[in-house]
Image (cartoon, coloured by chain):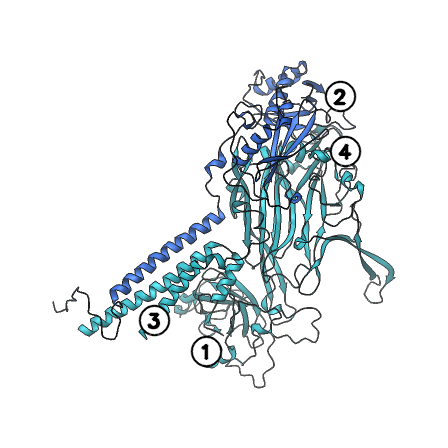
């Protein structure tokens, strides 16, 4: 017994020491982004859903915030995959409708450099502020806000009736603030946990104090009655998007054109259900385009295939109705050029070898497109409002880069939906229990709950889950019909007033009287699958499952016809070892069930898996510390035990 | 007292156990483990903090002169400015020390001294330093690009400096590009404007806004910004701007109002003030 304890303590201590000694070799390989920037210039963030973004950032004097080597790692992929070589503002053209004034802010004023503003707490309520050297007189200033922000519902699916699969999403958001004259601009990149990238420019500050007219149809009266016509104007924001899909040497630009065949189908209640053909054609040479209805563009790496054998790509989604088509500098939605290091600005280019040139000049030689750069122009015609007076509410313009086949399934797919790939007709849903011949209302039916081995994508960190069907017999689930009497069934019209009549001893307990949860395994490692069962819910209701003490949503499930929830979830990789409480809440009945299970010390394989994912020294040190603590505690306990034995012997 | 006293002496090792395995040694080992754990956890915290926050870098916030025409500018340094102790990664953001070094090295190039600044003095007018477009190279070396304006030839000049090899790799020049003006160019344009006979309405406007103050280049109530100005087909009065270097100054008076300067352009190449419409 003693030997075993000592052996255990020793091996824990050795493992801790080994972790440190083996640190250099255990360190994960450098990612594509890490190869190009370091320290504070690197942003690396694993979002709550498990997907990761990495990017380099810097402040360019003219263009402001530049992101380089932007890479995305879908949750179940081994490493980040490059999406963009770089993205930045390329021009901001502001012509006033009177024709008297026009600005090109990026090249003639600067968006970075002396125009970049120091961020304050009000600019950055979520995340952290990082500094950048911006100009000689100010040196380093708080320049970038980077943080994870909630983005609302990420997905919601109830198609298979085995569970409501729903989750909230988050974005990694990077933004800066620049002041150019009376306008202030927020440049924002929103990297969604599902791989989408939203690129936006927000304009606030003040309307031009110099531009008022008495020509009624070129401005808007913002003073009393018919006075003070503030001049309407355009903001055309241009971004240079240098694609680097999976670091491809060759990438193609493809155009989707959906046209009406002229035919109509025979079904449909209007008789006007058109038959549409979508054709994909390749853009061979440089060009600029003004998008027509039902046209779309994507950049695809033909040599980078996802698990389904489909080529990875990103689609460019632009608003279609606002381009300023009255000037050859701005008369396109998207232009594609072959990447050139001296073609940086969309107009009034500052690099001497292409001095003063614009995109229209870049495309004039019609080069082949093998390393495409997209110039995305988003126009916004600002017809002023009374509300736009000081301080002007921020107004936004931007576009979206949308992953297409970057992952073979939804990048944040819940475990229970991994079996769905393609036409699922005729494929048995492994999550739906087989009908049991003798259903008994008082004990959970032995259900063939799916184990992770049925998932199409094997998860290397998943440890074998004990068969949950063996568990209920060891720990009989309390009779669900006996429980509700402890807690009155919530009345939907309840106003929160104390229950009438006596017996308020139970009312004091409030919601504390929870039903039990039975777990498939008392002890699971982070990243492994835990199964659980609880009864007493309203049949068919949605039941949310939240892991405490740090609340982590692990899923939303549906109670079966007997009011039982029998489901599974993946224990988050960052779950701390020790006891965790799972709280299930019926979303209709308000019935609460809860139980505790232990998260084990991560198995070595899982540890190294986690290290490979995060690649930070902090994890290694933290793990070493925890192991040392555990070893120390074991030895301390043993010491105490031996002393006690000695005292007992003396007494 | 009937409680048995526990002798403080070390117990003899119980039979069958190794001698070192006593409660005391285990206690000590436990304490050592706890101590080591504390150290490791502190390290973990520190590493995590360092990974997410700015490393203290005193050198990077050393102020340097914004304009090459300033007396303390790196372009005018008498003693050589040393390269940065640590060369940044290809796509890293700028550091003060490398900008200072790159400006100094650029000024040693013969093309620099041959040029003229906004005051007509020797040496080109420094405009900006940034990371040179990294996709142009694949050797992992750190390069910055400085832009200058040469008032002798009315050209924008770029110098790509390889920080890794400490050399100026390329110098290119062209007419027709007009990067944003510097603080010195802005201030000089403002001075030219105020000294011109066209300034009268601006002076009067300022007096009206401030209750009679005289407008001078020293007026503390004025905040200046400026943009480079290129003529287009609709501009009358400043047709050479774009080929020559012109700026338009915005002068904001304390309190928010802007003086009416949009009807003037200052041609810095010819040191003249032009009315435009």
The span from disc 4 to disc 1 (Cα, nearest Å) is: 76 Å
- Helix, strand or loop at mark 2: loop
The span from disc 4 to disc 2 (Cα, nearest Å) is: 27 Å
Task: Say which of marks 1 and 2 sits in front.
Answer: 2
Question: Which residue was labeled with disc 2?
Answer: B237
Crowd rating for badge 2 (residues with CA inside 10 Å; few <14, some 14–19, many 20+): some
Residues under numbered marks 4 and 1 in contact, where contact means CB atoms less than 8 Å apart: no
Residue sitting at 48 percent across and 56 percent down? Answer: A24
* Above/below status of B111 relative to B213: below
Question: Which residue was labeled with disc 3?
Answer: A5
Residues under numbered marks 1 and 3 in contact, where contact means CB atoms less than 8 Å apart: no
Residues under numbered marks 4 and 2 in contact, where contact means CB atoms less than 8 Å apart: no
Q: Give the chain ID for the blue colour.
A: B
Q: Are marks 4 and 2 on the same chain?
A: no
Question: Which residue was labeled with disc 4?
Answer: A217
Left or right, A45 with respect to A288, comes to left
Q: Quadrant of residue B139?
A: top right
Question: Which residue was labeled with disc 1?
Answer: A478
Crowd rating for badge 1 (residues with CA inside 10 Å; few <14, some 14–19, many 20+): some
Q: In the rendered image of this protein, which colour is used for chain A?
A: cyan
């Amino acid at each position: 017994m003693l030997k075993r304890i000592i052996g255990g303590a020793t091996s824990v201590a050795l493992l801790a020491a080994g972790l440190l000694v083996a640190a250099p070799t255990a360190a994960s390989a450098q990612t594509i982004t890490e190869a190009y920037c370091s320290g504070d210039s690197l942003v690396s963030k694993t979002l709550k859903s498990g997907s990761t973004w990495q990017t380099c950032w810097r402040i360019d004097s003219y263009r402001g915030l530049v992101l380089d080597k932007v890479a995305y790692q879908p949750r179940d992929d081994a490493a980040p995959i490059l999406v963009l070589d770089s993205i930045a503002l390329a021009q901001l053209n502001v012509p006033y409708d009177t024709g008297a004034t026009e600005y090109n802010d990026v090249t003639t004023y600067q968006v970075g450099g002396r125009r970049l503003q120091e961020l304050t707490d009000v600019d950055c309520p979520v995340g952290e502020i990082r500094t950048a050297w911006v100009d000689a007189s100010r040196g380093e200033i708080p320049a970038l806000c980077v943080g994870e922000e909630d983005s609302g519902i990420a997905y919601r699916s109830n198609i298979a009736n085995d569970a409501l699969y729903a989750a909230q999403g988050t974005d990694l958001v990077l933004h800066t603030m620049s002041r150019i004259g009376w306008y202030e601009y927020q440049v924002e990149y929103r990297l969604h946990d599902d791989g989408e990238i939203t690129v936006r420019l927000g304009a606030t500050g003040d309307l031009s104090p110099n531009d008022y007219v008495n020509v009624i149809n070129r401005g808007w009266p913002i003073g009393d009655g018919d006075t003070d016509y503030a001049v309407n104007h355009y903001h055309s924001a241009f971004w240079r998007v240098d694609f680097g899909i999976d670091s491809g040497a060759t990438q193609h630009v493809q155009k989707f054109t959906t046209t009406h065949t002229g035919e109509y189908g025979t079904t449909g209640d209007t008789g006007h259900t058109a038959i549409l053909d979508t054709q994909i054609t390749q853009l061979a040479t440089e060009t600029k385009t003004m998008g027509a209805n039902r046209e779309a563009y994507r950049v695809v790496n033909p040599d980078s295939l996802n698990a389904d054998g489909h080529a990875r790509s990103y689609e460019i989604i632009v608003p279609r109705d606002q381009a300023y088509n009255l000037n050859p500098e701005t008369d396109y939605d998207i232009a594609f050029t072959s990447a050139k290091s001296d073609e940086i600005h969309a107009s009034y280019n500052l690099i001497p070898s292409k001095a003063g040139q614009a995109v229209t000049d870049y495309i004039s030689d019609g080069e082949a497109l093998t390393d495409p750069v997209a110039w995305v122009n988003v126009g916004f015609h600002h017809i002023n409002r009374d509300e736009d007076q000081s301080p002007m509410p921020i107004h936004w313009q931007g576009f979206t880069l949308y992953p297409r086949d970057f992952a073979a399934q939804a990048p944040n797919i819940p475990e229970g939906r991994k079996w769905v790939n393609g036409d699922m007709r005729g494929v048995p849903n492994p999550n739906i229990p087989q009908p049991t011949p003798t259903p008994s209302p008082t004990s959970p039916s032995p259900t063939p709950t799916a184990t992770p081995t049925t998932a199409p994508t094997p998860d290397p960190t998943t440890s074998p889950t004990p068969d949950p069907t063996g568990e209920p017999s060891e720990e009989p689930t309390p009779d669900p019909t006996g429980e509700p009497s402890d807690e009155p069934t919530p009345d939907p019209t309840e106003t929160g007033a104390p229950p009438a009549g006596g017996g308020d001893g139970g009312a004091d307990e409030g919601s504390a009287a929870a039903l039990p949860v039975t777990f498939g395994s008392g002890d699971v490692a982070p990243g492994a699958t835990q199964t659980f069962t609880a009864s007493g819910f309203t049949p068919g209701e949605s039941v949310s499952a939240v892991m405490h003490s740090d609340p982590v949503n692990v899923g939303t499930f549906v109670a079966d016809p007997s009011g039982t929830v029998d489901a599974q979830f993946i224990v988050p990789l960052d779950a701390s070892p020790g006891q965790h409480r799972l709280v299930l809440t019926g979303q209709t009945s308000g019935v609460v069930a809860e139980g505790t299970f232990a998260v084990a010390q991560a198995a070595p394989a899982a540890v190294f898996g986690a290290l490979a994912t995060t690649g930070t020294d902090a994890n290694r040190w933290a793990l070493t510390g925890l192991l040392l603590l555990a070893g120390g505690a074991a030895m301390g306990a043993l010491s105490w035990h031996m002393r006690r034995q000695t005292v007992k012997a003396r007494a | 007292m009937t409680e048995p006293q526990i002798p403080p002496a070390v117990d003899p090792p119980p039979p069958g156990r190794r001698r070192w395995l006593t409660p005391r040694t285990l206690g000590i080992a436990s304490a050592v483990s706890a101590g080591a754990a504390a150290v490791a956890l502190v390290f973990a915290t520190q590493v995590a903090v360092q990974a997410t926050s700015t490393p203290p870098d005193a050198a990077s916030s050393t102020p340097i002169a914004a304009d090459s025409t300033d007396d303390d500018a790196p372009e005018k340094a008498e003693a050589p400015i040393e390269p940065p102790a640590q060369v940044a990664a290809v796509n890293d953001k700028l550091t003060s020390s490398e900008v200072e070094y790159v400006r100094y090295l650029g000024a040693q190039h013969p093309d620099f001294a041959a040029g003229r600044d906004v005051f007509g003095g020797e040496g080109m007018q420094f405009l900006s330093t940034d990371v040179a477009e990294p996709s142009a190279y694949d050797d992992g070396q750190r390069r910055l690009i400085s832009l200058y304006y040469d008032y002798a030839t009315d050209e924008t000049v770029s110098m790509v400096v390889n920080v890794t090899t400490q050399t100026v790799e390329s110098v290119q020049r062209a007419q027709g590009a007009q990067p944003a003006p510097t603080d010195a160019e802005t201030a000089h344009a403002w001075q030219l404007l105020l000294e011109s006979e066209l300034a009268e309405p601006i002076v009067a406007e300022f007096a009206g806004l401030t209750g009679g103050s005289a407008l001078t280049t020293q007026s503390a109530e004025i905040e200046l910004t400026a943009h480079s100005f290129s003529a287009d087909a609709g501009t009358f009065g400043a047709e050479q701007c774009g080929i020559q270097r012109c700026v338009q100054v915005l002068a904001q008076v304390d309190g928010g109002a802007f003086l009416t300067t949009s009807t003037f352009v200052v041609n810095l190449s010819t040191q003249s003030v032009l009315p435009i419409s």
